[in-house]
Amino acid sequence: MEYLSIVFQEVYKILFLLVPVLVSVAMIVWLDRRVWAFVQKRQGPNVVGPFGLLQSLADALKYIFKEIIIPSSSNKVIFILAPIVTMTLALIAWAVIPFSATQVLADINVGILYLFAVSSLGVYGIIMGGWASNSKYPFLGAIRSAAQMVSYEVSIGVIIINVLLCVGSLNLNDIVIAQQNMWFVIPLFPMFVIFFISALAETNRPPFDLPEAEAELVAGYQTEYSGMMYAMFWLGEYANILLMCAMGAILFLGGWISPIDVYPFTLVPGAIWLILKILLLFILFALVKAIVPRYRYDQLMRLGWKVFLPLSLIWVVLTASYLFYFNLLPVN
Amino acid sequence: MIAHSIFFYTFSIIAVVSAIMVTASKNTVHSVFFLILDFISISCLFIMIGAEFLGMIMLIVYVGAVAVLFLFVVMMLNVAQQKNQWFTGQQSSRHIPVGLIISTLIFFEIIIVIGGWKYKPEIFDINNSISQASISNTHSLGQILYTDYIHVFQISGMILLVAMVGAIVLTFRQRSGVKRQSYIKQISRERAEGVEVLEVQSNKGVKLDD
């Protein structure tokens, strides 16, 4: 009986986390399209519901009632597994995101490593989908995304090392609390820029959306997918984008800490600040999508390996020597 | 404790079964997927014994990077051709003795290590180096790795670097006649060297040179 009550409590907590995440994924799809439209002087989706807010729900309904087509020459088990893997990996990472000092599902002491591990597993959904489709364009898209995501993960890892040098702990709450006096975006500003661009590449967002470049590869790894399975890829992708924004907010923008440490602002719950910071980063993501043209593949690889990796490594040396010289290394 | 052992047996059964499936499955891509499942369940086992850092690094390095490249290579290979040469033909029996010798060696090594650990624990200097329980696993690992074992750590890093440089040297070849773009050259182009105004005579044309 005791076990059951614990299980119920945990399930309740998980639902309380996942349902808002899924709803906000649907909302940011709408926001993405609206921002994109406004940059191009269009209206965007504005018909369904007030300001078109219910557009994503209508889309989801459409996807649910569409037929799922499984190609006869595909590898059926892996073909069906691929969108499930993408979706699951995008959602399980939210378990460690702290919304305030106490509001976190799993406050583990290797939180940032967990986030990094889960985001690096995200490539499997794409490779599995591309390979199992047994068709040329999906396969090319999958190969492209595998190379791209592995390359940019390296520089994200080195950037995380930069932040960890200043914190001295792998726990996400400790990372947030270490930014009480100054957000890391100020001393580590170049790293924040590189993190933002690498996050664009890691989530296959424009200008790095080569795995699904419609002019070259139809829709890349998603070409053979239809109905709800396509929608799951789509949801997983946007959940990953939100996750990357949350990671950026926690590593550089002070997570749930209020930006102004004065009386009326400190009353606002930390979750609200975190959500506002995530939204800010997401609007930047959406603006980049509307403004910047797509990279060529060799330019993408050059940027990752020859520019970002050396830069972030040099910055690790700089940060470490600065902290060591001024005796600021966090020791406990 | 019951829940603990249920989880332990679940993960270890998955690990062993997927390890067998890596060698047993006909499709090489399936083998790599089973290998990934094996890595994941082993990292879960690491996390269960409290080695959370090791488990996460296992996920990041093996599953997130090494296995992706494995998959990359295996997908690009011509699997049907490989099958004829290695897995079915007459040559396959020639590899059995080599495999047997290597697996017996590994088996005896494991037996020596586990037996020694069980019956002569003082040989292995683990208990002295593990610090007090108040420090987390990650902290104690960092304290040992960068103080007592710094030279070993650096040497292993150098070995990896040498392996990487060696792989690049082996596969690198200078190809002639490849047109490359130079960003500096492209940006620093002036109008004077790019555009030329010519007086074209009729029926003669112009000779262009790149």
Image (cartoon, rainbow, N blue to C red):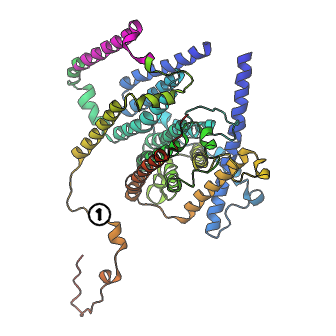
Q: Residue furthest top?
A: B119
> Is B149 placed left or right of A191 in the picture?
left
Q: Which residues are magenta?
A: B98-127
Q: Position of residue B188 (x, y in %)?
A: 35, 74
Front-lying residue, A214 or A279: A279
> Is A326 placed left or right of A267 in the picture?
left
Front-lying residue, A4 or A169: A169
Q: Position of residue A47 (x, y in %)?
A: 73, 60
Q: State yes or no: residue B204 in magenta.
A: no
Looking at the rendering, which quadrant does residue B167 occupy? top left
Looking at the rendering, which quadrant does residue B170 occupy? top left
Which residue is painted at 62% across and 67% down in the image? A39
Residue with the mark numbered 1: B180
Q: State yes or no: residue B103 in magenta.
A: yes
Front-lying residue, B101 or A155: A155
Q: Secondary structure at mark 1?
A: loop
How many marks the image carries: the answer is 1
